[in-house]
Image (tube, grey):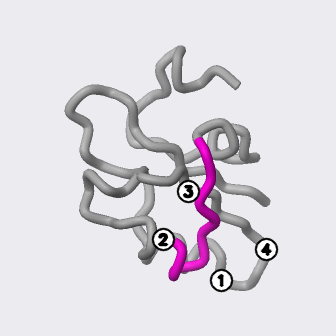
Amino acid sequence: MQIGIPAETRPGERRVAATPETVKKLVAGGKNTVLVQAGAGVAASYPDADFKTAGAQLVGAAEALGADIVLKVRQPTDASSAR
């Protein structure tokens, strides 16, 4: 299953829906693929390299939003949910 983690788009939002530690747990066992939007964790002090080391694939917004399951901190806006 693909799990997408897009960057949050609301002004002032610094959180990200998953941490590198969470990504490790999601990919354990090999049944899930985690797609993290490049730069999604920067405001929360999680650089892309940490997500990649944890087993995530770094992708663009459209690919993260097009996953089977999408994890977000806040409800998607019309702009961020458009595919």
Q: CA distance from mark 1 to mark 4?
A: 7 Å
Residue contact at pointers 3 and 2, CB within 8 angstroms = yes
Q: Is residue 48 above or below residue 6?
A: below
Image point 64% across, 20% down: which residue?
Answer: 82
- Identified by mark 2, the residue type is Phe
**10 vs 60, nearest the viewer:** 60
Q: Nearer the viewer, mark 1 or mark 2?
A: 2
Give the magenta-colored segment's residue range. 52-60
Tell which circle, 1 or 2, labels the residue nearer the N-terminal end.
1
- Identified by mark 1, the residue type is Ala
Most extreme residue toward the left is: 12
Where is residue 22 drawn, in percent x and y? 47, 71
- According to the image, label 2 marks what residue? 51
- According to the image, label 1 marks what residue? 28
Q: Is residue 16 above or below residue 45?
A: above
Residue 29 appears left or right of 4: right
Mark 1 crowdedness (10 Å alpha carbons): few <14, some 14-19, many ≥20: few
Q: CA distance from mark 1 to mark 3?
A: 16 Å
Image point 42% across, 51% down: which residue?
Answer: 40
- According to the image, label 3 marks what residue? 36
Q: Is residue 37 above or below residue 45?
A: above
- Identified by mark 3, the residue type is Val
Give the position of the C terminus as an image quadrant: top right
Q: Quarter of the image holding residue 7?
A: top left
- Identified by mark 4, the residue type is Lys
